[in-house]
Every structure is written in structure tokens, then in C-alpha cells.
Amino acid sequence: MKNELLEKIINCLEDKKAIDIKTMEIKEDTTLADYFVVASGTSNTHIKALADNVEIELKQQDIYPNKIEGYNTATWILMDYGDIVVHIFTKQERENYNLEELWEKTKKNI
């Protein structure tokens, strides 16, 4: 069952037209987080807009990230909200790192 924060993050990404939003439940596989949210943007500007929208909307509800990485280059922005880690990629970076396949292979090897 998805939690409320997860739904808020997904809605923020959808509001700014994120591409191919995927949610991976990883809590049984790692202590890093309970969920990864992976999405793509069409450009560096779009990726920053997606991250900005998530951050602004959640701050209005007194929810703050533990850390944000990659904002300056905006090819892969990572937003750490504790139990939920948001990854926003350019199409090229998403294909390069392929987190969805990597985590799927990890699950199969356990």
C-alpha cells in the first residue's frame, strides 16, 4: 500500500508533466529507503522544474528533504525524503544508470 507522502510526490511530478514515473518498493531489499520514485524530464530546465515543484509543494506542508543532490548539473537530481528517494533523470542518464533494471535484478538474485 502506498503512503501519503509517496502519493504527494507522484502528484507533484505529474503536475509538471514528468515522463514515465515509476515507483519501486525496495524496503524488503535495503535499508536505504522504502521506495524509489524514478521519473524523467525533457531537458535540464524541465528536470529542475520537476524537482522545484516537489520541494516547494512539500515545504508548504512542512516536509523537507534530508538532502538534494545533482541540482546544479540537472541530469540526475536525487531528492532524499528519508523513506522515499526521488530520482529525476534526463532520458540519457536514466537509460545509462537504468535503476529499474538494476533493482529488478537485485530482487531476483536475493
Image (cartoon, helix red, strand yellow):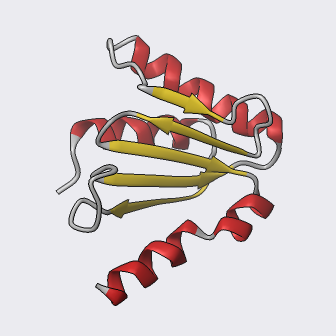
Q: Which residue lies furthest to the bottom in this view?
A: 109
Residue 81 position in % (x across, y down): 38, 33
Q: Quadrant of residue 85?
A: top left
Residue 6 position in % (x across, y down): 32, 43
Residue 107 position in % (x across, y down): 34, 80
In the rendered image of this protein, does residue 50 appear above or below residue 32?
Answer: above
- Image quarter where the C terminus lies is bottom left
Drawn side of residue 78 relative to residue 84, left or right: right
Drawn side of residue 74 relative to residue 7, left or right: right
Q: Residue furthest left?
A: 1
Q: In which quarter of the image is residue 97?
A: bottom right
Residue 2 position in % (x across, y down): 23, 52
Nearer to me, 10 or 15: 10
Nearer to me, 65 or 57: 65
Q: Residue drawn at (71%, 39%), measured in percent from left and top?
A: 47
Q: Quadrant of residue 10?
A: top left
Nearer to me, 61 or 99: 99
